[in-house]
Image: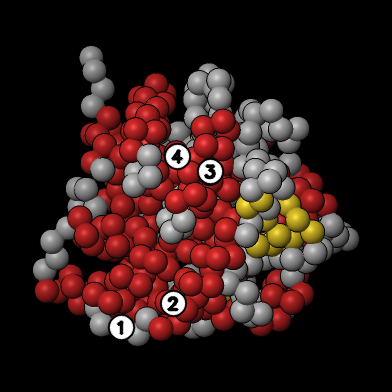
Amino acid sequence: MKRNLTKDAIKVLIGNRRKGYTLPTNNKLYPAQWNWDSVFIALGYSYFNFDYALTEINTLLNGQWKDGMVPHILFHDKNTNYYPNHTAWNCGNKIRSSGITQPPILASIFKKILYQNKLTNKQNKQAKKIIEKILKYHLWFIKYRDPKKTGLISILHPWESGYDNSPIWDEPMKKVKIEKNLKYKRGDNKVIDPEFRPLDVDYDRYVSIKNHLKKQKYNPKIIYKTSMFNVVDIGFNSIFLKANKDLLELLKKYNLNLSKIDKFIKKSENQIMKLYDFKTKSFFSKDVKNKKKINIPSITNFFVLYADIKNEKFNRQIIKDLKKYNKGIKYIFSSIKPNHKSFEEKRYWRGPVWINCNWFIYQGLKSKDKLFSKIIKKKTINLIKKTGFNEYYSCKNGKPFGANNFSWSAALYLDLIND
Ligand code: DGY
């Protein structure tokens, strides 16, 4: 019998739904609400239950800190084996949370949801409140993550990127001193085969950075200067630039103050282009802490296409590079270029294919290379058809790794087939 994937996708999302929020998967790997997972999930809900979409976003924003930050994890359920849990972070505003953030995709996805739906007056009022909170979130980034007003924002922990153990962080992470007598127990590699997960040495460093941030009481002014990790990443900045552009439109529509966002966009657009070297045809992120360039062939660099930079020559070159990135590879896009020395077929963000990365690239290409964008969409849908809604996949044979019943793969499937 032919499976009905739409029904299956809805089943995954509903199955992972808890009171007002949704887990990234139904096994015990991620027993909380994650920032960017939650936003992708809201997009999925918007195709069959608009209230669920709004609730998911409202719950996420209920965890917003007073200074504007929206945390990367909200711990609604305190009794789980996840590490680091709410006591390990020991922070939060109305909801216990982690003390760092995650890729700010909310503005863009919220705009997509709003433009694809007709809102009642009551929903419109709710939407305005949400947009005000997103504005506060973006101003937090601009104020605290770019205090030198460069037009580019920093992340202070690899977990903020969402691509935790990407080789992009290898060099800056090598410099992170592991705390003496570090005591903690990982939960993730008990649930999922350790060969798919980050290494213990990575975790030692994640926890050391986290402990250091905690000691500074997550004071945003202080940790920018003192964090053991401070990187300006192309992918993260591209997501933020796109989010600012979408937020700007929403601010106009709802008559809200847009001057600070407008100013930042102009600066940011120029600075992001400078992270690409036309001569060597390669991207550079910046290790701000150690004043070094980072040059790793990661699919996340291509998120610049998603940022919709207004420069045709630039975009054309990036698309040309992208077409070479996975030449001869059956299942696209590998998170790291397969011929790079850091590539690992199975390990989390060091090689596997992630549905959300394909989604960013697809969104970015739609207006620039329609044919190519359609190919990517088709290949992404076919990969899901092959083995279902998994966390990540082999670029060599499409085999699934990590968790199954993965919410954002289900949510983005719904978006892709409706887009
Ligand atoms: C995890 O636990 O692996 C998450 O990616 C951290 O945010």
Q: Earlier in the sequence, mark 3 or mark 4?
A: 3
Residue drawn 58% across the image and 33% down it: 325
Q: Amino acid at mark 4?
A: Asn
Q: Which of the two discs, 2 and 3, sits closer to the camera? A: 3
Q: Is mark 2 within 8 Å of ligand 1?
A: no
Horizontal arrangement in the rendering, residue 388 relative to residue 28 (left or right): left
| Tag 4 residue | 358
Give how far apart the Cα atoms at labels 1 and 2 are: 11 Å
Q: Earlier in the sequence, mark 4 or mark 1?
A: 1
Give how far apart the Cα atoms at labels 3 and 4 are: 19 Å
Q: Amino acid at mark 1?
A: Leu
Give how far apart the Cα atoms at labels 2 and 3 are: 28 Å
Horizontal arrangement in the rendering, residue 241 relative to residue 193 (left or right): left
In what element is the residue under mark 4?
helix
Residue drawn 79% across the image and 59% down it: 292
In what element is the residue under mark 2?
helix
Q: Residue 112 appears in which quarter of the rendering?
A: bottom left
* Disc 4: CA contacts within 10 A as few (<14), some (14-19) or many (>=20): many
| Tag 3 residue | 317
Q: Which of the two discs, 3 and 1, sits closer to the camera? A: 3
Residues at circles 1 and 2 in contact by the CB criterion of under 8 Å: no
Q: Earlier in the sequence, mark 3 or mark 1?
A: 1
| Tag 1 residue | 256
Q: Amino acid at mark 2?
A: Ile
Horizontal arrangement in the rendering, residue 17 relative to residue 166 (left or right): left
